[in-house]
């Protein structure tokens, strides 16, 4: 497990389990919040599964989730783009 700081965020990366936890900085509108993202392989399919715990207002939490969903979509596109079977 490695724990780093990136732009005020605490990022815990568990490579053994293909999981990344992202914790909001104290000045973030959605703080306190934690987002867990895990790569899950089922057969030949790789999925990015996300869960979140957010203690801020619904609007701030919804915005945070939307931002992570957009990041997840970019990761999914990159994974597909790197798969020789999708070209």
Image (spheres, rainbow, N blue to C red):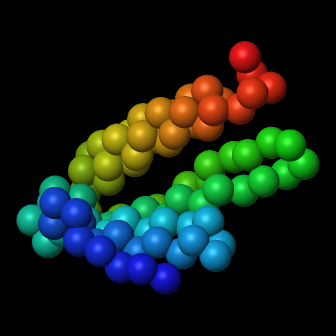
Choose between 33 and 3: the one closer to the eye: 3
| 24 sits to left or right of 11 | left
Give residue 43's position: percent from left, percent from top: 90, 48
| 45 sits to left or right of 10 | right
Give residue 27's position: percent from left, percent from top: 9, 65
What residue is drawn where x is 49% and y is 66%?
A: 20
What residue is drawn where x is 46% and y is 72%?
A: 13
What residue is drawn where x is 32% and y is 49%?
A: 64
Which quarter of the picture shows residue 9? bottom left
Quadrant of the frame with the C terminus: top right
Choose between 43 and 32: the one closer to the eye: 43
| 42 sits to left or right of 9 | right
Q: Residue furthest bottom?
A: 1
Total numbered circles: 0
Q: As displayed, is residue 68 above or below residue 14? A: above
Give residue 25's position: percent from left, percent from top: 18, 68
**Does residue 31 appear in this view?**
no
What residue is drawn where x is 72% and y is 56%?
A: 40
Which quarter of the picture shows residue 19? bottom right
Q: Residue furthest top?
A: 87
Q: Residue furthest left?
A: 27
| 53 sits to left or right of 77 | left
Choose between 58 and 39: the one closer to the eye: 39
Give residue 17's position: percent from left, percent from top: 65, 73
**Does residue 78 appear in this view?**
yes
């Amino acid at each position: 497990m490695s724990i780093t700081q990136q732009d005020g965020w605490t990022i815990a990366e568990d490579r053994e389990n293909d999981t990344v936890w992202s914790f909001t900085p104290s000045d973030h509108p959605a703080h306190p919040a934690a987002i867990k993202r895990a790569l899950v392989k089922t057969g030949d399919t790789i999925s990015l599964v996300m869960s979140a715990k957010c203690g801020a207002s619904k609007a701030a939490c919804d915005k945070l989730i939307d931002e992570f969903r957009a990041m997840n979509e970019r990761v999914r596109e990159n994974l597909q783009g790197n798969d020789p079977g999708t070209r």
